């Protein structure tokens, strides 16, 4: 390998060299550009022999959810199904992936506009759920309960501020039937950063949190980020199901969506732990609207993934959970789901 690889931090450099050599032999890297340098992974766009590839180097840190020995087989299965770019190298032990690089285009250019995006996302999720079942981790409500427990102990919010969240979550958890035999292959984190448009089609990327889950988790996440109106939600569901949803499915979707909001509220808030942004416990959930936050990021006034941004995302999601509890449809959904 040539000197370009020396730009990679020393603690990850030799893993990169080994993966590149195993995949491409002695072919030289002619270009290397850093894309992300986060705590969980560093990614680079590299060029060899006139083609572009993605080089992803995981952090050595592992936990029950972020584990390449589980996520890499999920990624390979998704690639075989044409849902994510082709994978050329995936070494779970070393935590290195080399895949085709996708040059991203703005979703504003998508054929058919927002409706086209939503329709095709429904089809993508249907195809994902047909992939042979990903490995299990643990049930989604238990994972959220664990994260929420960490949030309660974190000191990020003043005592008592999360009491309504705790009560609401326990009510949802008691009402929602968890059927381990009905779980399907799921991405579990389909926020906008994990969706790419290449000018022709959509790709799902970053399978770090992929595992077997309730079919509605990915659908609920998409309704939050891409299909927030009743019309778009209906389009997404019809594309995913191949038919109109029934009353029970809509009730289950409402409750799952609230669990997803709580997941994002916990995960984003905890990501800010230890930063100066988290030094003072929050006394409320005041935050920009999701649209205002996206505009701040798009205009460069807010850095996505930074502790300040994570703190805001956490507040937005936790405020959304409370709004869901206050909606009259919540009680109706609980009753409908309990009755089945």
Image (tube, rainbow, N blue to C red):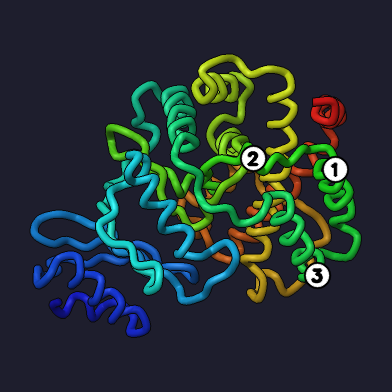
Tell me how far mark 2 sits from mark 3, CA to CA. Answer: 33 Å
The nearer-to-camera label among 3 and 1 is: 1
SS for callout 1: helix
Question: Do the CB atoms of the residues marked 2 and 3 lie less than 8 Å apart?
Answer: no
- The residue lying at 48 percent from left, 68 percent from top is 40
Quarter residue 182 falls in:
top right
Q: What residue does disc 2 label? A: 181
- The residue lying at 34 percent from left, 80 percent from top is 9
Q: Is residue 44 left or right of residue 59?
A: left
Q: Examine the rendering and report whether any part of residue 102 can be seen.
A: yes
Judging depth in this view, the residue of 2 and 243 nearest the camera is: 243
Quarter residue 162 falls in:
bottom right
Question: Do the CB atoms of the residues marked 3 and 1 lie less than 8 Å apart?
Answer: no
Q: Examine the rendering and report whether any part of residue 295 can be seen.
A: no
- The residue lying at 79 percent from left, 63 percent from top is 149
- The residue lying at 63 percent from left, 74 percent from top is 275
Question: Do the CB atoms of the residues marked 2 and 1 lie less than 8 Å apart?
Answer: no
Q: Which mark is residue 153?
A: 3
Asked if residue 142 is positioned above or below residue 122 in the image, the reply reads below
The nearer-to-camera label among 2 and 3 is: 2
Q: What residue does disc 1 label? A: 174
Residue 122 placement (x, y as % from top left) = 49, 28
Residue 61 placement (x, y as % from top left) = 51, 75
Judging depth in this view, the residue of 24 and 183 nearest the camera is: 183
Residue 65 placement (x, y as % from top left) = 57, 61
Q: Residues within 10 Å of mark 1 (few under 14, many from 20)?
A: few
SS for callout 2: helix
Q: Which mark is residue 151?
A: none
Going by the picture, which residue comes out furthest to the front? 181
Tell me how far mark 2 sits from mark 1, CA to CA. Answer: 19 Å
Judging depth in this view, the residue of 4 and 24 nearest the camera is: 24
């Amino acid at each position: 390998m040539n000197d370009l690889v020396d730009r990679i931090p020393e603690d990850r450099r030799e893993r990169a060299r080994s993966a590149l050599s195993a995949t491409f032999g002695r072919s030289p890297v002619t270009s290397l550009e850093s894309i992300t340098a986060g705590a969980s992974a560093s990614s680079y766009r590299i060029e060899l022999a006139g083609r572009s590839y993605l080089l992803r180097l995981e952090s050595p840190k592992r936990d029950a959810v972020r584990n390449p020995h589980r996520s890499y087989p999920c990624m390979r299965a998704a690639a075989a199904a044409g849902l994510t770019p082709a994978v050329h190298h995936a070494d779970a032990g070393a935590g290195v992936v080399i895949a085709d690089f996708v040059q991203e285009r703005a979703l504003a250019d998508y054929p058919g506009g927002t409706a086209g995006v939503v329709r095709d996302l429904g089809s993508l999720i249907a195809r994902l759920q047909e992939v042979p079942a990903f490995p299990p981790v643990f049930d989604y409500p238990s994972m959220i309960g664990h994260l929420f427990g960490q949030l309660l102990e974190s000191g990020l919010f003043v005592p008592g501020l999360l009491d309504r969240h705790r009560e609401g979550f326990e009510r949802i958890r008691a009402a929602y039937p968890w059927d381990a035999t009905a779980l399907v292959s799921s991405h579990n984190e389909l926020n906008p950063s994990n969706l790419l448009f290449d000018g022709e089609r959509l790709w799902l990327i970053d399978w770090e949190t992929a595992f077997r889950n309730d079919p509605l988790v990915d659908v609920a996440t998409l309704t939050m980020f891409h299909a927030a109106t009743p019309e778009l939600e209906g389009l997404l569901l019809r594309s995913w199901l191949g038919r109109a949803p029934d009353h029970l499915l809509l009730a289950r979707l409402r409750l799952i969506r609230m669990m997803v909001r709580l997941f994002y509220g916990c995960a984003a808030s905890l990501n800010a732990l230890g930063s100066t942004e988290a030094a003072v416990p929050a006394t409320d959930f005041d935050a920009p609207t999701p649209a205002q936050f996206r505009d701040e990021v798009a205009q460069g006034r807010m850095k996505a993934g930074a502790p300040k941004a994570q703190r805001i995302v956490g507040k937005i999601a936790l405020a959304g959970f409370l709004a869901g509890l206050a909606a009259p449809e919540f009680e109706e959904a609980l009753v409908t789901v309990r009755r089945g």
